[in-house]
Amino acid sequence: MSDTSKTDPKMLEALICPVTHTLLRYDAEAHELVSKKARLAFPIRNGIPVMLIDEARPLD
């Protein structure tokens, strides 16, 4: 069972970046929500998006 199988896709579309307040892009391969503007990737764990800045992965 994938991390997003428990997550409502409509909810993923409604989430915004906590830093820039812009829309996020879902990266299905990495199970992350990506903020291009903030250059951060927020993980999805057990079907729950973790929208904490301290938990985000910086993008190259």
Image (cartoon, helix red, strand yellow):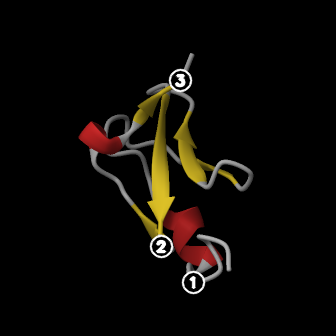
Estimate the x, y position of residue 37 in percent, counting from the top left. Answer: 50, 27
Label 3 secondary element? loop
Mark 2 or mark 1, which is nearer the start of the sequence? 1
Estimate the x, y position of residue 48 in percent, counting from the top left. Answer: 43, 70
Q: Nearer the viewer, residue 35 or 41?
A: 41
Q: Quadrant of the N terminus?
A: bottom right
Mark 1 or mark 3, which is nearer the start of the sequence? 1
Label 1 secondary element? loop
Q: Which mark, by number, is residue 46?
A: 2
Q: Is residue 50 above or below residue 53?
A: below
Label 2 secondary element? loop
Q: Nearer the viewer, residue 55 or 14?
A: 55
- Residue located beneath label 3 in the image: 59
Label 3 neighbour load within 10 Å: few <14, some 14-19, many 20+: few
Q: Which mark, by number, is residue 6?
A: 1
Q: Residue furthest top?
A: 60
Q: CA distance from mark 2 to mark 3?
A: 22 Å
Give left or right: position of 10 versus 39: right
Q: Residue flagged by tag 2: what amino acid is it?
A: Asn
Q: Nearer the viewer, residue 14 or 53?
A: 53
Q: Are marks 2 and 3 in contact (CB under 8 Å)?
A: no
Residue at image x 56%, y 78%? Answer: 7
